Amino acid sequence: MSKFAPLQKRQDAPTAELATGDHLQRGTPVHSSWRPYLQIARVDHWVKNVFVLPGILVALSMQPSRLHFFSWRTYLLGILSICLVASSNYVINEVLDAPYDRHHPIKHTRPVAAGLVRISWAYVEWIALMIVGIVLAMTVSGPFTYVLVVLWVMGCIYNIPPIRSKDLPYMDVLSEAINNPLRMLAGWYLTGSTLVPPASLLLSYWMVGCYFMAVKRFAEIRDIHDEGSRARYRKSFAFYTSERLLVSIMFYAAQAMLFFGAFIMRYRVELILSFPAVALVMSLYLALAFKPDSAVQRPEGLYREPALVVSVVACAVLMILLLFVNIPLLHRIFAPTIPELLHS
């Protein structure tokens, strides 16, 4: 028997019912509290915006003069605007995913899927969060605002038909993970840097995001044993298998480290010492995906994994130090030895 047997009765309703709000008009009770609307904004997911920090640190390490223009007000407004735009994307995700979430053993209790949210109000919340976030971004800078507009548009591409890239195998990972380099760019422009962000670093950051997203998909598919339930929950799961996802995870990890290596050899060779720490974090993260009901399915709860937390903190501290501490010996060890490169 499918592990989703308790949910089978819910499958009789039209899949578009929750997305249109028809169930509300037929008298299904709707929670009058503001709490469900706060829940669909996923404030607890704001922790993911820690991916903005590397953009800030790398920009300051490459252009230290920007430290003289540091303003707590600018930084706080910038971070708040990123969080609000991200929450706008979370809201539309909750609304349009509700018909599919009802086929998931845990996500069927989400506020929209459970009928606790008026769909019309949720759409208002979606637009309002975006507007407030973009208005706040405009107080920071033009480039910063453009990045947040693109971040919001990518949320639309990921969630809204007819494109809805989250239903397309591999495109779901690539389009969702592009939020990683966008967050890095947001952090970069939050400093007011006048330099062009290194493409190699942005590509590495994108592939790291793809790696994390593919590992999440791998953990999800391992927990849904019934193939029919997989496809009803997420259309791309009609194509994905554990083997295909593992192969893609390997590809994303290799690409991430390749572009990271290209970045450090050109801009910051000291970061080569962080390679083992980065590899350890990625290995521990993959290991978690093999656990039942893995924490990688809900990244906001990863703080409950002590080994991963310690390794991430140690890796972050090491990388921050290497961004600002020069080690001349490394430059001599890894200096080009091919004559053409020496004279280029």
Image (tube, rainbow, N blue to C red):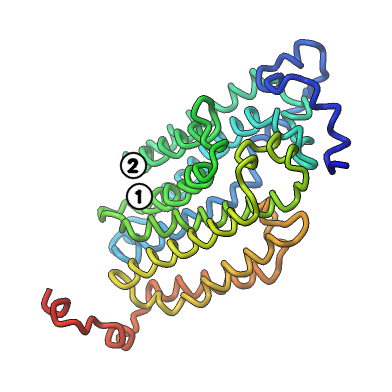
Badge 2 amino acid:
Ser
SS assignment at label 1: helix
Reply above or below: 211 against 278: above
| Identity of the residue drawn at 32% across and 60% down | 68
Residue located beneath label 2 in the image = 141
**In this image, 173 relative to 65: left or right?**
right
Reply above or below: 234 against 79: above
**In this image, 5 relative to 37: left or right?**
right
Is residue 203 or residue 185 the one in the foreground? 203
Evaluate whether residue 312 shows in this view.
no
Residue 313 in the image: state x and y as whole percent: 58, 70
SS assignment at label 2: loop
Is residue 312 or residue 293 the one in the foreground? 293
- Marker disc for residue 5: none
| Identity of the residue drawn at 17% across and 76% down | 341
Residue located beneath label 1 in the image = 189
Reply above or below: 155 against 12: below
Q: How many marks?
A: 2
Q: CA distance from mark 2 to mark 1?
A: 8 Å
| Among the two numbered marks 2 and 1 on one chain, the one whose residue lies closer to the N terminus | 2
Residue 203 in the image: state x and y as whole percent: 38, 56
Badge 1 amino acid:
Tyr
Residue 12 in the image: state x and y as whole percent: 80, 22
Evaluate whether residue 74 shows in this view.
yes
Answer yes or no: do the residues labelled 2 and 1 have beta carbons within 8 Å? yes
Residue 207 in the image: state x and y as whole percent: 46, 56
Picture quarter with the C terminus: bottom left
